[in-house]
Image (spheres, rainbow, N blue to C red):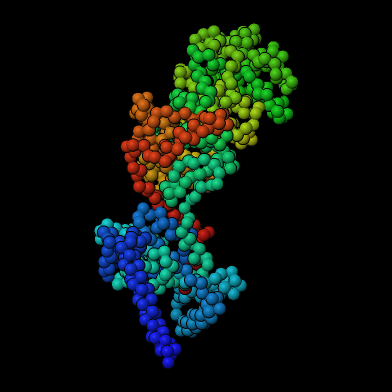
Amino acid sequence: MARGSKMRKHDQAAPATIQAATQQTVEQHEAERIYREGVVSLRDIIAPSSIEIESNYIKIGRRFARTMFVFGYPRSLFTGWLSPIINLDEIIDISLNIVPVESRVVLENLKKKVGQLEASYAINQEKGKVRDPGLEAAISDAEELRDKLQVGEERFFRFGLYLTIYGKDLEELDLVGRKIESILGTSLIYTKNATIQMEQGFNSTLPLATDMLQISRNMNTGSLSTSFPFTTADLSRNEGVLYGLNRHNNGLVLFDRFSLENANMVVFAKSGAGKSFAVKLESLRLLMLGAEIITIDPENEYQTLCDAVGGTFLRISLASDTHINPFDLPQTVDPDEADNALRANIIMLHGLLRLMIGKMAPSEEADLDVALINVYGSKGITNDPMTHTAEPPVMIDLYKTLIQLGGAGPALASRLRRFTEGTFSGIFSQKSNVDLNSKFVVFNIRDLEDELRPIGMYIALNYIWNRVKTDKRRRVLVVDEAWQLMKYPDSAAFLFSIAKRARKYYLGLTTISQDVEDFLSNRLGRAVVNNSSLQLLLKQSPAAVDIVAETFKLTTEERDRLSQFPVGEGLFFAGLSHVIIRILASPTEEQLITTNPQQMLEATGGVAAAGSVGSDTAAVPAAATIIPPDLQTPEQQMAQTQDSVPAASTPPAGTAPAPAPFVAPQTQTQTTDNQAHVGS
């Protein structure tokens, strides 16, 4: 009896224990629920304060939204028809719903459809009705689609296109809607608002892969491919330097100019548009990748950058100690080049002397040619490459040779005299003492008189060209204010010859000019442009827009923008691709390369401007010196790294906020080669 009583007591205690445990679990879940309700989740953070759903719009917080769908397409579509909407400067959510359909089902339906169409055609024929072009086109399209589906060349899809637009009020919403209807309407593509289905339409454009509207159109592979949205030019590569920001899609323009057919580049802009800024920024970044930079600087704009990177700054003027002897011969390794070195240099000297003493008669040209050969011969230099290591003559030697020469020699000597004994003596009539063994070399000709500037640029270019032919390395030659060379046929021809032959010597020629009309009106100037795979067109004066648009085959929209670009923005051409670019520099880079007088005065006082090209400025520390990595000691590399971290991670005080990026619409060009038929 006692044992049975104990068992009954145990059986009664078990449900009570289970009930207590269950109650405890419920209380724990309730406590966790109450706790979770008091914790901010990700959903709480991203959720709007309120949602108001109306028949023709949705109000999300303080923003209005409206969903539109495409219901009508033309018989044929052109590649990139969606690009103007993608690049529109408005906030738009676009959803492309693509559902594949089995070819077997489509073929059966097409078979029935073709039968119906042919029956209608036969009935019209029997009744003697006038031919119906629309019916004939439908039969032809259906038969063509059947053939391609049968052999697997095409597939069939259900395609739905929805767009959700946003605005701060209903007026802006209506304005954006009309803008989209107008853009699509030009391609005979028609849209409607998802009236009474705004919630379903809004959910269909969320990144949830749901189609609650179920409004679609049959399309084959070719037609569907024309709606591919990412058709804007992309100039982002895995190697190269950063040129700026692609305003089409806010991507980076990261490019290696040496990967193109040639590494030549032309830069055209009006004064103050940022052309020298852009070129100096590219030079600084190329320098960090190991390239050598040689610059012809007519306005002393490169000295700060040259000093910062430990380069060589050569000041060429009547009072300077820097001398370049135009009679120097290149020490080329190529046997063919070596055999022709003397002859090529004599031809170059003919062009130089025409710049110096003016136009010559044919008899004078002949006497000058004899004098040049004789003056080299007096130093033991002939066409034999073994003699090219001898000491070359100088301009005073040519002067003496001309005096002793019969015919027109004495008259030529008198015209040359001011460059050997007169006002301009000394600068071009002494032995060269220029060292190009630096990673960054600047030939400054600011202090040369206007009459001597083209001569100085010509001689400097020839000296550089001889050095390039002697030692092939990855180099960039920058010629600023190149329009001064284009004014004279001989110097223009010499610049063109460099542009044409630079690729062979691993050289990239960068030509900068603000006098666009003079440069492009010259036949050789246009030839330099045609031999340049990179082109940068910044803001142009209205008078120069027409010739620039004609030379570069710009669209109407690009032409209209050309005179409206802000400072530091323009068109960037790389091969067949071109984008609207905004040039960006770090505060340290801008401190080294800016030529804005206000910013330079601030930098002199201990405050430098920061930001991108333009008027937005900010305060940064004045001490910033960059030394190329291959020239740095380990201590300098560590100090350089430590100095650059704060500038990159902490914005300087007073920095103006960057303007919101503007996505420029891309002009659509329709051709008959890339059209595709839309399925029925």
Residue 292 lies, in percent from the top left, at 57, 31
For this view, does 492 lie left or right of residue 505? left
The one of 21 and 555 positioned closer to us in this rendering: 21
In percent of the image, x 38 and y 83: which residue is there? 13
- From this view, report whether residue 668 is shown above or below residue 461: below
In percent of the image, x 52 and y 65: which residue is there? 222
- From this view, report whether residue 654 is shown above or below residue 666: above
Residue 307 lies, in percent from the top left, at 49, 25
- From this view, report whether residue 570 is shown above or below residue 3: above
Residue 437 falls in which quadrant of the image?
top right
Residue 164 falls in which quadrant of the image?
bottom left
Residue 420 lies, in percent from the top left, at 56, 10
For this view, does 233 lie left or right of residue 612? right
Residue 386 visible in the displayed image = yes
Residue 290 lies, in percent from the top left, at 57, 34
The one of 409 and 417 positioned closer to us in this rendering: 417
The one of 82 and 563 positioned closer to us in this rendering: 82
In percent of the image, x 45 and y 38: which residue is there? 645
Residue 616 visible in the displayed image = no
The one of 289 and 538 positioned closer to us in this rendering: 289
